[in-house]
Image (cartoon, rainbow, N blue to C red):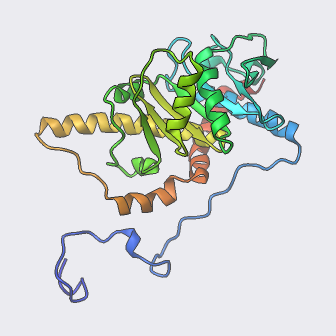
Amino acid sequence: MTETQTNGSKPTAIVPHEPGITVEQAKVQMPRFPGPPKFEDKYEEREYLKGRLAAAFRIFGKYGFDEGVAGHITLRDPVDPTTFWVNPFGVAFSLMKKSDLIQVDHSGNIIDGGPVRLLNAAAYMIHSAVHSARPDVLCAAHSHSIYGRSFCSLGRPLDIITQDSCAFHDDHVLYTAFNGIVLAEKEGKDIAACLGNKKAALLQNHGLLTVGQTVEAAIFWFLSMEKCCHAQLMADAAAAGRGGTTCKIGDEEAAFTYKTIGTPLAGWFSAKPEFDKIEKETGGDYLQ
């Protein structure tokens, strides 16, 4: 960059970035995202959201996020927000239907749902604590995805090294304890406390946990974080092989990018293609 291009200031090798431009200078603006549907009837909303939850399991199954019977996604019930819907223990993600889902209260009682009324104790311990601690969370997702659990064995948070990882800038935590399968109420509460007001947690030696104000956002954050873990594992290995390290994105640039791709609405909208594809691929049979 020349001195003329810097308005008489000293030459710089730093490339100008978007935080420095004004609205007037920007020739193309990001369109306003549409939003999730609104419902006046809470029972109608429940049926719609259960369909989205069933679709979420199909998406997880499609990407191989199942590991035997491990993994769970929960939905706060809009009719009775003190309860949540979850997958029955032992039913495959890729076969999940709306009618399979079970409704659970915060005492661990199954109060409604499909024919398989088995509750994963770990699902109850983690998700009950998260839903209790975070009234803003509609949906929480956890599974033992391969890159997520691999990265979680490193005991470190994500580096902000890609545009996509900016969605997690200052918005994820590392939970460093591992005490086996989460069967104790205390550990569920510890995980919820560590999560705080963030959208995602790396559970050390375990896997990823993401939350959202919509089903779609929680699922997209999980998909994206899994890919960010994959990208960093490869980037770190490639950099180490050359005797170097990865290039980190600056805090200002990451914070600016977060405002576009890291918001709850951005998460909801970013998931739309995945939900559209799973409906097309399955013929919508998960809605049964």
- Out of 131 and 94, give the one closest to the viewer: 131
- Out of 282 and 262, give the one closest to the viewer: 262
- Say if residue 165 shows up in the picture: yes
Task: Establish if 273 lies above or below 61.
Answer: below
Task: Establish if 227 lies above or below 28.
Answer: above
The image quadrant that residue 115 belongs to is top right
Q: Residue reaching furthest front? A: 186
Could you tell whether 9 is left or right of 204 in the image?
left
Seen at 43% across and 50% down, the residue is: 170
From the top left corner, tell me how far across and down residue 156 is, in percent.
Answer: 33, 36
* Callout count: 0
Seen at 37% across and 35% down, the residue is: 229
Q: Residue reaching furthest left? A: 243
Seen at 55% across and 46% down, the residue is: 197
Quadrant containing the C terminus in the rendered view: top right
Quadrant containing the N terminus in the rendered view: bottom left
From the top left corner, tell me how far across and down residue 67 is, in percent.
Answer: 49, 15
- Say if residue 280 shows up in the picture: no
Seen at 47% across and 30% down, the residue is: 208
From the top left corner, tell me how far across and down residue 284 is, in percent.
Answer: 72, 29
Could you tell whether 7 is left or right of 139 in the image?
left
From the top left corner, tell me how far across and down residue 154 is, in percent.
Answer: 31, 29
